[in-house]
Amino acid sequence: LIGENPVGTPNNLMPYVAQVAVGRLPHVNVTGTDYDTPDGTGVRDYIHVVDLAKGHIAAMKKFKDNCGLQIYNLGTGKGYSVLEMIKALEKASGKTIAYKNCPRS
């Protein structure tokens, strides 16, 4: 199997937030609100798996044409906070997504 267990609890933010949006989970635990970011939550560069796969293919094609060491950073180039991602899914789904602020462990 590739990816998360479709009947288990998601391990990644967006599948987890989506499960809350459809009522399968009660809320999102937002771990840490004291980061040095605009809203205090963690920031990551989220990229869709299809875009990541396309980047891998492009890198392999480049390697085929030019052997040698090359470093490619695959991402969108912009970070989004956990709360920004929750708000984006709220806007897209038209549903309020419950979340709880939790301390970092």
Image (tube, rainbow, N blue to C red):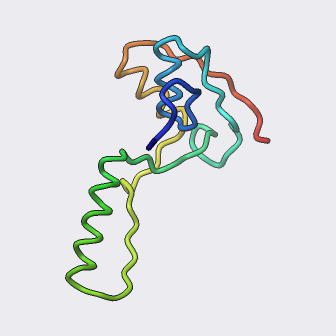
Q: Looking at the picture, how far across and down is residue 56, in whole percent?
A: 32, 63
- Left or right: residue 12 versus residue 31 is left
Viewer-side residue, 1 vs 82? 1
- Left or right: residue 68 versus residue 80 is left
Q: Residue furthest right?
A: 105
Q: Looking at the picture, how far across and down is residue 36, in whole percent?
A: 65, 49
Q: Quadrant of residue 104?
A: top right
Q: Residue at x 69, y 27 (%)?
A: 101
Q: Residue furthest bottom?
A: 68
Q: Residue at x 47, y 43 (%)?
A: 80
Above or below, 70 relative to 24: below
Viewer-side residue, 93 vs 20? 20
Q: Looking at the picture, how far across and down is residue 1, in whole percent?
A: 45, 41
* Quarter of the rendering occupied by the C terminus: top right
Above or below, 79 relative to 20: below
Q: Residue at x 41, y 52 (%)?
A: 78
Q: Quadrant of residue 69?
A: bottom left
Task: Please count the marks in the image.
Answer: 0
Q: Residue at x 59, y 46 (%)?
A: 37
Q: Residue furthest left?
A: 65
